[in-house]
Image (cartoon, rainbow, N blue to C red):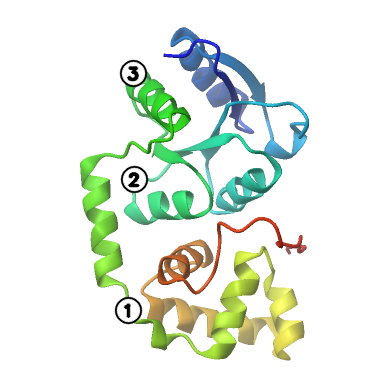
Amino acid sequence: MDVTAKVLVVDPVATTREGVALILERCGFQVDRSGSADAWPTHQCMDAVVMNVHTEDDFTGVRALRDRHDSVIVALLRSSEARDYQTALTCGARAACAWDTSPQDLAMVVTAALAGRTVLPTWIVERLVGLVQQAPPEPTVSAEELRWLQLLARGGSVTELSIIAGYSPREVFRRLRQLYQRMGVSNRQQAIAVAGTWGLVDVAATGDRRRLSRV
């Protein structure tokens, strides 16, 4: 292991942040802590960022972090659902693992990510393959819905969608629910991830992405 590797642990919860940091320090990494990715200065270089994903909105945080820093991102997931692994990777994480993984496995995942490899549990890989195979065909997304997905992938909000489309926010929510059902997903982040696998949205692009407010 490269003991000179610098790792930033991001978690708003001090106890879990400190726990992950101590594990990585004992494994030989140089570790810094931060309660928020936005609070970390862009000029301070880290080799990797280990980010605890507590909620759906934290996936947006992973994407924002990827846009601001060149560091390798490892997502610690509270859920063991295959779609959450898929979403984390699509949002820009190099690797993902369960938040309660063993210290040895966490160190292995971070070390592999720094070396340009992604380590995932076999059963997660099998389910990810299944998600791709079971995904509904692209024609289920209309031209208007495609524009909506592209806006959401750039961080757009339902309020912005309602203004652009000329619908009320409630109507936008209703149409989005229908779209998610047809895509075989249950929320915004999963829809973006699936659209990314279809090549409908480029969630990896960073150069021309503009910042959009969210509500």
Residue 90's spot in the image, x, y percent?
A: 48, 55
Q: Which amino acid does label 2 sit on?
A: Ser
Q: Name the residue under label 2.
A: 80
Residue 24's spot in the image, x, y percent?
A: 48, 16
Quadrant for the C terminus, please. Answer: bottom right
**Regarding mark 1 in the picture, which secondary structure is present there?**
loop
Quadrant for the N terminus, please. Answer: top left
Residue 33's spot in the image, x, y percent?
A: 65, 22
Residue drawn 74% across and 39% down? Answer: 38
Q: Which of marks 3 and 2 is nearer the N terminus?
A: 2
**Regarding mark 2 in the picture, which secondary structure is present there?**
loop
**Measured along the vertical axis of the image, is residue 94 above or below residue 202?**
above
Q: Earlier in the sequence, mark 3 or mark 1?
A: 3
Q: Which amino acid does label 3 sit on?
A: Gln
- Residue 104 is marked as 3
Q: How far apart are marks 2 and 1 (CA)?
A: 23 Å
Please give left or right for residue 182 compared with residue 20 in the image: left
Residue drawn 55% across and 89% down? Answer: 143
**Measured along the vertical axis of the image, is residue 129 above or below residue 36?**
below
Badge 1 local density, few (<14 within 10 Å), some, or many (20+)?
some
**In terms of depth relative to the viewer, which is nearer, 130 or 181?**
130
Q: Which amino acid does label 1 sit on?
A: Pro
**Regarding mark 3 in the picture, which secondary structure is present there?**
helix
Badge 2 local density, few (<14 within 10 Å), some, or many (20+)?
few
Q: Name the residue under label 1.
A: 136
Q: How far apart are marks 3 and 2 (CA)?
A: 18 Å
